[in-house]
Image: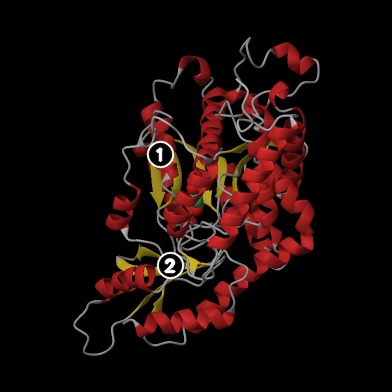
């Protein structure tokens, strides 16, 4: 077979095809950005109809430019646009331009991070990025980490290492070899009632079930209540249960609240527990010179979940799991003759699969490498500080309004609030807030979040876009109030 549109090879005709396809795609994407809305596409039924196809695999294919026309017509207009300042629904961000360039390199060369011979320089770059990240979060020489598919996997990885450490060192039971110890139903970990559901998913996947997660009440600022935590641990010990881990949240998904890490560290030391930090959201705060102190407690945690596809503005997926003591990664190491032979390490070849739950894995570390180098400490500080400043500004505007209730003062960049019906309105507040969010989505090109706080339906601004500004936030607030 000789075809010049299969792969990028050293052949000149292949190179030409590559450049033409990429150029045409880049142009189509750029010209799709023709309006400032976060979403101006179809609703669910219409969209389903529009993309319905029984001909996904036609008998004869067609040219790339024909497909691109189809993409321009059907797909690009119906994509949500996280780069818009009208977008603030989730922890889902616009992506920095240089990271899109990185994605092109990642996809074109398709390195796989499991073994050195599939990713020579990529392996060495990931090792360097991880080493620098550990230093940035205040970890010492014995720390290590690995890139993962996201915060959920980073949490699972951290909690798995916590459980294995506890079984191996405290119970003298080799859990990797023999599975869970007989008393596993008594194992308990603690996370706050507003922690991410990946805590429960993780204990389920680890064979311990949701029951292993004890939900700790939060204070008015949505932070884990340490007094209540101590009471729960004491009660569990008294009942014969076995605490092994506290999972703090550094930036809760809804509120951005940060659990009190210093106090939690003391308590974990007292009871001999692993302290995991789910900083999927809050990990970005370290980049802000002005606000980094809010997450300085991360240095004392045994494991940290860092997400780069949230505050760090890098494309999905990009996340890391950091461990204070690298020996614990042994829990994820298993050797195979076809991949990661033990003799490789003796000869200086690093096979990153030894630390990872995934085998085949993307070269996501390149996106961190490129954006850190390009923006530098000052550039990064400015980006992150702006988002946190925006949240503070918006909060200060909201609390001035008698017709708005705010859930908590933001610690990072999320603001949860609800608007109240005007006097004489027949609509209750929950219905009104839900209706406003839908109207914004389908008629105003504005995509915001919705959640429940203390039993009330609330609206949520997750401010991850450093292009967001005060005038625009004022405008959005007026728009929301006008829809009551
Ligand atoms: C987003 C989030 C997660 C999950 O991360 P993914 O990257 O979506 O898997 C976990 N914890 C918190 C606090 C989060 O906000």
Determine the residue positioned at 39% across, 24% down. 183
Q: Are marks 1 and 2 in contact (CB under 8 Å)?
A: no
Task: Decide if ligand 1 comes within 8 Å of the CB at mark 2.
Answer: no
Q: Determine if residue 306 is in view.
A: yes
Nearer the observer, 130 or 13: 13
What mark, if any, has residue 201 been given in the picture? 1
Q: Position of residue 377 (x, y in %)?
A: 78, 59
Which quadrant would residue 42 be assigned to in this image? bottom left
Q: SS class of the residue under badge 1? A: helix
Farthest-out residue, left: 426
- Look at the image and tell me in which quarter the N terminus lies: top right
Q: Residues within 10 Å of mark 1 (few under 14, many from 20)?
A: some
Farthest-out residue, right: 347
Q: Residues within 10 Å of mark 2 (few under 14, many from 20)?
A: many
Nearer the observer, 30 or 312: 30
Q: Position of residue 178 (x, y in %)?
A: 47, 15
The residue to which callout 2 is attached is 448
Q: CA distance from mark 1 to mark 2?
A: 26 Å
Q: How is the image coloured?
A: secondary structure
- Look at the image and tell me in which quarter the C terminus lies: bottom left
Q: Position of residue 244 (x, y in %)?
A: 49, 36
Q: Is residue 77 depicted above or below 346 in this figure?
A: below
Which quadrant would residue 303 be assigned to in this image? top right
What mark, if any, has residue 472 been given in the picture? none
Q: Position of residue 118 (x, y in %)?
A: 69, 24
Q: Earlier in the sequence, mark 1 or mark 2?
A: 1
Task: Decide if ligand 1 comes within 8 Å of the CB at mark 1.
Answer: no
Determine the residue positioned at 47% across, 87% down. 400
Nearer the observer, 34 or 312: 34
Callout count: 2
Farthest-out residue, top: 337
């Amino acid at each position: 077979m000789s075809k010049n549109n299969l792969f990028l090879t050293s052949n000149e005709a292949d190179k030409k095809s590559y450049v033409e396809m990429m150029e045409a795609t880049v142009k189509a994407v750029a010209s799709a950005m023709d309006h400032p809305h976060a979403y101006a596409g179809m609703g669910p039924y219409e969209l389903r109809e529009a993309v319905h196809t029984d001909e996904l695999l036609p008998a004869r294919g067609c040219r790339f430019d024909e497909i691109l026309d189809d993409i321009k017509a059907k797909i690009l207009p119906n994509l949500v646009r996280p780069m818009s300042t009208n977008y603030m629904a989730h922890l889902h961000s616009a992506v920095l331009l240089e990271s899109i360039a990185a994605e092109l390199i990642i996809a074109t060369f398709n390195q796989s991070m499991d073994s050195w011979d599939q990713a020579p320089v990529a392996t060495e770059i990931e090792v360097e990025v991880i080493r620098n990240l550990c230093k940035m979060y205040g970890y010492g020489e014995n720390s290590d980490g690995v890139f993962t598919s996201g915060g959920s996997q980073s949490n699972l990885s951290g909690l798995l290492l916590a459980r294995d450490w506890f079984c191996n060192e405290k119970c003298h039971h080799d859990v990797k070899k023999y599975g869970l110890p007989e008393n596993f139903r008594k194992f308990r970990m603690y996370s706050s009632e507003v922690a991410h559901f990946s805590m429960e998913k993780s204990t389920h996947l680890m064979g311990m079930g949701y029951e292993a997660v004890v939900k700790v009440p939060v204070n008015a600022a949505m932070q884990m209540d340490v007094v209540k935590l101590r009471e729960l641990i004491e009660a569990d010990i008294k009942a014969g249960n076995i605490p092994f881990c506290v999972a703090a949240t550094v930036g809760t998904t809804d509120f951005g609240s940060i659990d009190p890490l210093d106090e939690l560290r003391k308590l974990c030391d007292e009871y001999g527990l692993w302290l995991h930090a789910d900083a999927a959201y809050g990990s970005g705060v370290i980049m802000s010179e002005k606000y980094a102190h809010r997450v300085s407690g991360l240095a004392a945690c045994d494991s940290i979940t860092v997400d780069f596809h949230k505050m760090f503005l890098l494309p999905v997926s990009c996340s890391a799991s950091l461990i204070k003591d690298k020996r614990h990664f042994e829990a994820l190491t298993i050797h195979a003759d076809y991949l990661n032979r033990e003799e490789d390490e003796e000869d200086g070849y690093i096979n990153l699969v030894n630390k990872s739950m995934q085998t085949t894995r993307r070269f996501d570390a390149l996106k961190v490498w490129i954006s850190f180098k390009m923006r530098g400490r000052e550039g990064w500080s400015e980006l992150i500080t702006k988002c946190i400043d925006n949240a503070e500004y918006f909060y200060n505007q909201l609390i001035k309004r008698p017709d708005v209730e705010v859930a908590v003062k933001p610690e990072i960049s999320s603001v949860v609030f609800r608007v109240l019906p005007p006097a004489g309105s027949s609509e209750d507040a929950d219905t009104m807030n839900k209706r406003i969010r839908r109207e914004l989505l389908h008629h105003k090109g504005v995509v915001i979040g919705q959640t429940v706080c203390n039993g009330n339906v609330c609206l949520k601004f997750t401010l991850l876009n450093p292009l967001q500004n005060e005038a625009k936030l004022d405008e959005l607030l007026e728009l929301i109030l006008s829809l009551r």
